[in-house]
Amino acid sequence: GYAGLFGGTILCYLTALLTIIIFYKEVEKKEVVREAGYVEPVTPNLLRDMFLLIPFLAFVFLHVGQWMYTLNMPLFVTEYLHAKEANVGYLASLCAGLEVPFMIILGIMSAKMETRTLLMIGAILGGGYYFSIGIFD
C-alpha cells in the first residue's frame, strides 16, 4: 500500500543521508592538460571504470524514483485521497512551476555551500516530504 511505498522512500532517503554523513569526502580535482590530437590509450568502459559507472547508476536510480512518483501520484490522488482527476493536473503543474526557481536557487547555493552540506539538506528535506505525506491526512 501507500504506507509501504512512502515508508520505503523515507528509508531510501535516510540511507542516502547516512551514506553521505559516513562516507562522503571532497575530492581534489586535478587539472588535466592535453595537447591537441591526444588519443586515449584505452577506451573508457562503463562496467570497468567507476567514474562512469557510479554517475550512470545514480542517473538510473534518479529516473526510477521519478517514474515511480509519476505513476503513483495520480493513483494516490484519485484512489486514496478520493480527489478529482483535475487535482492531478494541478499538482503536476505546481511541480513543474517550482522546478525552475528551485534549480536557480540551488545553483546559487551550490556556489556558496559545500556539496556535502547540500546533499545532507536534500536528503533531510526529501525524507521529510515523504514522511509528511505518510502521516498527514
Image (tube, helix red, strand yellow):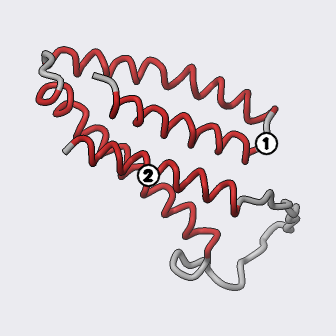
Q: Quadrant of residue 77?
A: top left
Check disc 1 and give the amino acid type.
Glu
Q: Nearer the viewer, mark 1 or mark 2?
A: 2
Placement of 102 over or under 128, stated as above or below = above
Residue lying at 26% horizontally and 42% vertically, measured from the top left:
3
Q: Which residue is mark 2?
A: 11
Q: Quadrant of residue 79?
A: top left
Q: Quadrant of residue 107?
A: top right
Residue lying at 39% horizontally and 49% vertically, measured from the top left:
63
- Percent from the top left, x then y, of residue 69? 31, 39
Q: In this view, which residue lies farthest toward the front?
A: 135
Dot placed on the residue nearer the N-terminal end, 1 or 2: 2
Query: Would you say 49 lies left or right of 2 here?
Result: right
Q: Which residue is mark 1?
A: 114
- Percent from the top left, x then y, of residue 60? 43, 58
Where disc 2 sits, the SS reads helix
Q: Nearer the viewer, residue 55 or 117?
A: 117
Quadrant location of the C terminus in the rendered image: top left
Check disc 2 and give the amino acid type.
Leu
Mark-to-mark CA distance, 1 and 2: 24 Å
- Percent from the top left, x then y, of residue 117? 73, 42
Where disc 1 sits, the SS reads loop
Any mark on residue 81, and which? none
How crowded pointer 1 is (Cα within 10 Å; few <14, some 14-19, many 20+) is rated as few
Residue lying at 65% horizontally and 30% vertically, measured from the top left:
106
Q: Nearer the viewer, residue 136 or 66?
A: 136
